[in-house]
Amino acid sequence: MTTANFHPSDDILRDFAQGNVTTGMSVALSAHIELCSSCRTRSSELESESIMEWLKLEGDSEPDFSGMIDTITALPQLTTEPQINSAPVNSDDLAVSEIHMLDRSFTLPRVLARAASNGLKWNKLAGGINQAQVQIDNETQCEFLYMTPGSQVPVHRHQGNEVTLVLDGAFEDQFGHYGPSDFLVRNKRDQHQPSTEEGCLCFAVLDSPLTFTSGLARLFNPINNYRFRRATSQRF
Ligand SMILES: [Zn+2]
């Protein structure tokens, strides 16, 4: 297993421990935590801290044990994968546990295998990018992205947050070079242009559409907004 160099912040892990993130985001976080032992440990610590803070808040009054148990059992269990659909899925039934692109195959973290278990439909985008969207919740656009070797995404800025988990290969932008298991968060201040020499498979979660900022790619902005609304079923 490759050690990640980029990890979710404590604030993000704390929100995750307290159940304050979208399901799409929790899938990306669960997948990173499956791949990253240091975030696994840190998540457990933050989950314990959240419980201790709750107990302290309750400390002045007579302890209400039934309420305490309800609250503790309502906290997200890090060993439990987020429920993508209501049907029980055991790992033997997963339709997609690997992704094959060109002559490579990639084994997916369990939570992503579950997210992809209805099958993936790949669309070719400009610049050697392949995209397969997965419907996880109604607030985010979640997708697998495969950048073919030598490809480059047009310069773009985000209207909200974009989380990217690198699954295989590597890519870079003006902020750094990212490899397997790396977890990146880009927000609306960041304008960047990812590119890859060796090819790269990622899982990405967007909470609002991209805005391309240069060249002909700007023509895609209305289409991106439309596709984002359709993917997330949001009404603006
Ligand atoms: Zn980590």
Image (cartoon, helix red, strand yellow):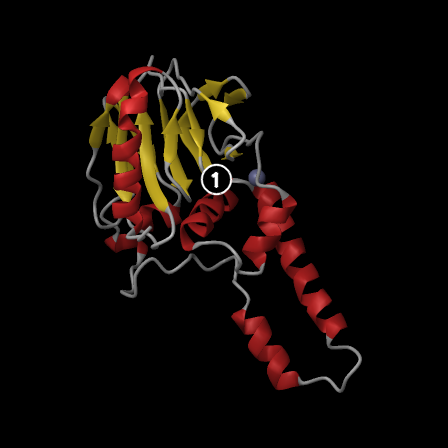
> Label 1 neighbourhood size at 10 Å, few (<14), some (14-19), many (20+)?
many
* Residue depicted at x 77% and y 84%: 61
Q: Position of residue 97 (x, y in %)?
A: 29, 43
Which residue is identified by label 1?
161
Q: Residue at x 25, y 27 (%)?
A: 101
94 w.r.t. 100: above or below: below
> x%, y% of residue 212?
37, 25
Q: Quadrant of ligand 1?
A: top right
In the rendered structure, the answer to whether residue 32 lies left or right of residue 230 reads right
Whether 68 is drawn above or below 236: the answer is below
In this rendering, would 2 be left or right of 110? right
- Residue furthest to the front: 236
Give the vertical position of 75 relative to 217 (above or below).
below
Closer-to-camera residue (80/28): 28
Residue 175 visible in the shown view: yes
Between residue 213 and residue 60, name the one nearer to us: 213
What is the tally of numbered marks visible in this picture?
1
- In this picture, residue 98 sits left or right of residue 209: left
Name the amino acid, label 1. Asn
Query: In the image, what residue occupies the spot 67% across and 54% down?
Result: 45
The x and y percentages for residue 148 are: 30, 19
SS state under label 1: loop
